[in-house]
Image (cartoon, grey):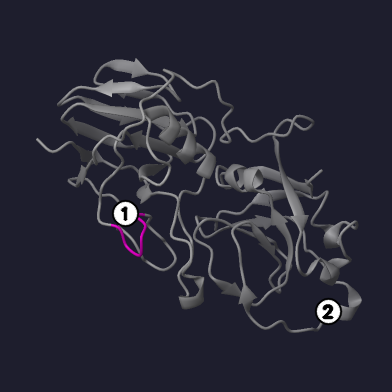
Amino acid sequence: MIPALEVLETGPLVLIEDEGRPGHASVGVGHSGAADRSAHRLGARLVGNDEHLASLEVLLGGLRVRARGRLTVALTGAPAPARVDDRPIGHASLVDLAHGSVLTLGMPAAGLRTYLTVRGGIDVAPVLGSRSADTLSGVGPPPVRAGDVLPVGPAGATFPHVDQAAHPSHAVPWGSGDTGVAELEVLPGPRSAWVGGWGSSLGGLLGTTWHVHGDSDRIGLRLSGFRVERAAPYRDVELPSEGLVRGAVQIPAGGAPVLFLADHPATGGYPVIAVLTASAIDRAAQLRPGDLVRLRPSP
């Protein structure tokens, strides 16, 4: 029997994701990959996978899968209540799935995305060298649906070393000084001078407490609650499209920031005034609509 996961239910959205497909921005194809890379990589280390093997990215729980063959799995990212048949299982720990057993994932109390990693990886056909689903371009595998049977690849030569990881989750991204407000670190962007320059408040971007807007997804996190103002010399200046990177903080004409995530476009025509650090991008990917967030300079 070829090992596989039979999908019984999916909840809001389940995507197949790996480390992404770099090197194609020149033809308009973005990097994509897991929205919370640290969670994906932790799952890979737990089960002994290469980090480039694919896992399942589960939005707000609701996933039910049945094991075909005996499988070793781990859950990382947003901690969610989970069971194998009638037995509760832990988060960030190794779980053995016997043939025919059913894993059920509930809704996380905090955070947005939980990762289900299977030893051997989800072995669907790669597109442009990656098994990642890119929701912007449509490149890669389609969203996982009930009735899908997802093949699992052969286990690698690396064996798991621990049963559980004592690892803080980015799904609870609160800053130590302000309970209830997620703090995200940023670095200078190429157009920081357009809003006063690095060392200023960047037109109000820094120090403001923002709300995560409901119109947010894997492409970008939209913030609301304030308007970032351009400095006088750039108030009426137009900007030609230029390349974008994961974590770019762009200010559209309306002044409400957009924090670009895994499925960001390859180019954009609004000023990028700051860039999230790698750790901050992972934390941003776990924020829900309505969450509070504050941006601060990276030390």
**Which residue sits furthest left?**
1
Numbered label attached to residue 201: none
Residue 251 rendering spot, x and y as whole percentages: 71, 67
Which residue does the image show at 51% across and 30% down from the upper left? 109
Say whether residue 195 is left or right of residue 167: right
Q: Using the image, determine if residue 151 lies above or below residue 108.
A: below
User: Taking the image as drawn, is residue 114 in sight?
Assistant: yes
**Which residue sits furthest front?**
157
What are the residue bounds of the magenta stretch?
126-131
| Quadrant housing residue 176 | top right
- Please give the residue where the numbered disc 2 appears in the rendered image: 235
The CA distance from mark 2 to mark 1 is 41 Å
Q: Residues within 10 Å of mark 2 (few under 14, many from 20)?
A: few
Q: Is residue 128 magenta?
A: yes
Q: What secondary structure do most residues of the magenta stretch adopt? A: loop
- Please give the residue where the numbered disc 1 appears in the rendered image: 143
Q: Residues within 10 Å of mark 1 (few under 14, many from 20)?
A: some
Q: Is residue 218 magenta?
A: no
User: Taking the image as drawn, is residue 61 in sight?
Assistant: no
Q: Which of 227 and 273 lies nearest the eye of the viewer?
A: 273
Indicate the amino acid at tag 2.
Answer: Arg
Identify the mark nearer the N-term, 2 or 1. 1
Q: Are marks 2 and 1 in contact (CB under 8 Å)?
A: no
Residue 234 rendering spot, x and y as whole percentages: 84, 79
Say whether residue 257 is left or right of residue 42: right
Q: Quadrant of the C terminus?
A: top right
Indicate the amino acid at tag 1.
Answer: Pro
Mark 2, secondary structure of its residue: loop
| Quadrant housing residue 92 | top left
